[in-house]
Structure formats: C-alpha cells, structure tokens
Image (cartoon, helix red, strand yellow):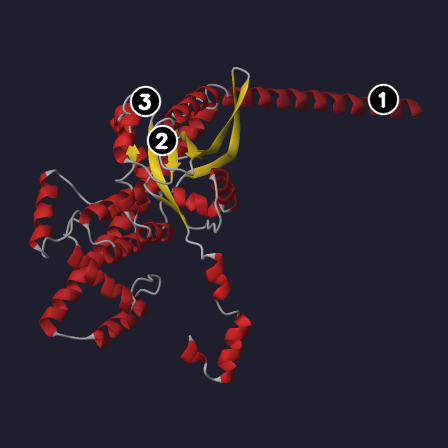
Amino acid sequence: MLYEFDVQLNKKRNFVNISKEIMAKNIDKRAVENLEDNFHGYAVLLHKIKQRVLVAQQRAIYAANEEMLRMYWDIGGMLQRSQDADGWGKKTLQRLAKDLKNDYSEIKGFTVRNMQYMVQFFNEYNQELTMVKGRVSPITKSLISQLEEYNFTLPIKHLDWTHNLVLIKQVKDIRARYWYMMQCITNHWTTRYLQEAIKLDDYGKHGALANNFTETLPAPEANNVKSMLKDPYIFDMLTFTDHYNERDVEIGLVKHVEKFLVEMGAGFAFMGRQYHIEVSGDDYYIDILMYNTFLHRYLVIELKDTEFMPEYIGKLNFYCSAVDDILCREGDNRTIGLLLCKSKDRIKAEYALRDIQKPIGISDYELGQALPKDFRGSLPTIEEIEKEFESGDGEQKY
C-alpha cells in the first residue's frame, strides 16, 4: 500500500511540474508577443491615434459652437423683424422664454436677457458672421469697405457666445475688436481675462512699444511677440512713499507675482528674480527671467529706476545671448529682451536698437499712486468717523 501511495504521489508531482513548465512556456510566449506588440513604434502609433481623436473632438466643439452662434443670429433676426412688424414689448419675450424653457429644458440660453442679446448680435454682424453691418456712421462704413477690400474678416465664429457678448458691449472700434478676438484665440484668454484686458486698454498699449522685432524675427514671430508685449506696464500693486530703486520694484513684483503675471499677459511663467548665470567663470544675475509657453521662448527683463539710457541695451543684449546658449533647449525660440524704464525718449530708443541683432523691446512702467505720509496722517480714523455718525452730524463734515 505504501508503495502504491508513493507511485501516485510521484505521478501528481510530475503532473504539477509538467503543468508549471507549460504555464511558464505560455507566459514566456505571451511576453514575447507583448514585446513584439510594443515593437515597431507602438507608442508613436498610439500617440497619432490620440491626436486624431483630439482633432475630431475639437472640430466637433467648433462646429457645435458655430451652429449655436448661427442659431442665435437667426433667432435674433426673427425677433427683430417680428418686433418691427407687431410692436410687442418685454412681456412677449417673457412668454417666449417660458414656453421655450418648457419645450427645451436642456438648453439654458432662452432667457429674456439672452434673447435681447440675440437681437443685438443680429443687428451687429452680417449673416456670414464675418463683419459688422455697415449701417452706422460714414466713417465706419468707409473703414468696413477698406477692410473688406483687403479680405479682412472678424473671427466671430471661433469665439464662444460670452466672449462675443463682451466684445459687442465693450469694444466699438472694429480694429480693436479684431485685435482682442485674435488675442483670445491665440492666447486662450478667458472671458474674465478679456474683460480685464479691455479695462486696462491692452490694445492701446501694444502700439507704443519701441522694438526691433521686425528686423530680428521672421514676420509671423515678430507679430506674435509684439502682441504679447505692451507699453506701458502698470504695476499698480506697488506703491512707494519714499525714494525707491529698481531692487525695491523687483522685490515688490515677486511679492505680488500673481498680479505681476496678469499684467504681463497670458502664457508667462515666472522663472526667477536675480536669476544666476555663469559666463567664462564670472557670475551674472538677471533681474527677472520669465518663459512664455505659447511663444516657446525666454523673456529677459531688466528693470531700471531711471529714464532710458542707450548703454542699457548692451547689457540686455549680452543676457539674451547667454540665455540662448545656456538655457535654451531644442524647440525653444530665440530669447526676447525687455527693458523696463521709468520713461524713454522714442528717438533715442530707436537709435539704440537699430543695429542690435537680438530681439529687444523697450517699455515704460508705472507704479500705483501712494498717499503722502503727511496727507494720510490728516485723514480721520475709523473710530473718529464712527463717532461722527453716532453724533448725527457726520454727513455735514464728510
């Protein structure tokens, strides 16, 4: 009996060993097959497929957005023509809003206010959504005819509804509106960022920048860089009552880096203050170094607490060359230099830039206005104001 038990046990062991060998061979075979699957550029193929899916998704979003804008334009036209013919008032819009909400509960655009915006949208743009209607002043009509002659079109269909509404309500100049539209598209501006840019008159500021970008960069790059930089920069988060120098401004900007980045514009990342580089064994420190993710290039900023002087350009040119050689990697474009001064003489700035090979801009900066110390001391305290109101004669004094 014991012998038979040993025989059976050996058979089971042999069976287990054979099974393990078969499993191991199958695992090895699958591993080889997986290696073969990952071979021949599998990762590249997967990336290409994902990119194609992303393009399809983006096209679907753009198509849906364009169709919605066209629908709003058509509805605005229907409302305008009906109102002209029948002379109805706001109660009709309220009734329409209620009935449309009941029938299309999944669509949130059928409010009284939004339908009023649809009418405004219809009256503002042509049916193709490419240009404003030339129905206002002779000057506007003349400008529109000039723009159409140069095949100029507004990219209305490439912006969503809220961006278009902000521009219709707040930007009347066609050229300025076109500029803001292009900034929204190329720099991915949010509605809030657009409103802030309009408030700060970004369009007006970008034309004053002294620069040599046209001479040192290809045309498309030069235009993109010009659109990114402005003149002047308003650092209203900084206020100084006493004398200050450029180092004080640097420290203040770093303390308020979030507001500083908003003022600089979309796509800028803060790389460092007094950024250290070494050239031929000597140490140098860049006032502020930034990187723009949209332009794929570094921005070297030099701050001066004086008016512009031509010799400032030489140092900035040196820093741009050093950053190009030391920091730039494959895919990075040429470094841009930006000199920020209290003020500048335009002719001196242009002369200083004329034969410089590195792309450099010169801009003014303005700080916030602080109250003088003696004036602040003369203001009433909170406690004094409260006492005045409690006594009942506060309104007569303030």
Q: Quadrant of residue 394?
A: bottom left
Q: Residues within 10 Å of mark 2 (few under 14, many from 20)?
A: some
Q: Measuring from the top left, give residue 8's x and y in whole percent.
A: 83, 25
**Which-is-in-front pick, marks 1 and 2?**
2
Location of residue 23 with respect to 97 vertically, above or below: above
Q: Nearer the viewer, residue 377 or 315?
A: 377
The answer to whether marks 3 and 1 mark residues whose Cβ atoms lie closer than 8 Å is no
Numbered badge on residue 309: 2
* SS at circle 2: loop
> Residues at badges 1 and 2 in contact (C-beta under 8 Å)?
no
Quick one: SS at disc 3?
loop
Whether residue 295 is situated above or below residue 32 in the rendered picture: below
Residue, disc 1: 7
What is the three-letter code of the residue carrying label 2?
A: Met
Residue at 46% over, 51% down: 239
Q: Report the residue marked by disc 3.
A: 356
Nearest the viewer among 291 and 355 is 355
Percent x, y of residue 290: 45, 34
For discs 3 and 1, the disc positioned in front in the rendered view: 3
Cα distance in 3D space between marks 1 and 2: 102 Å
Q: Is residue 38 above or below residue 171?
A: above
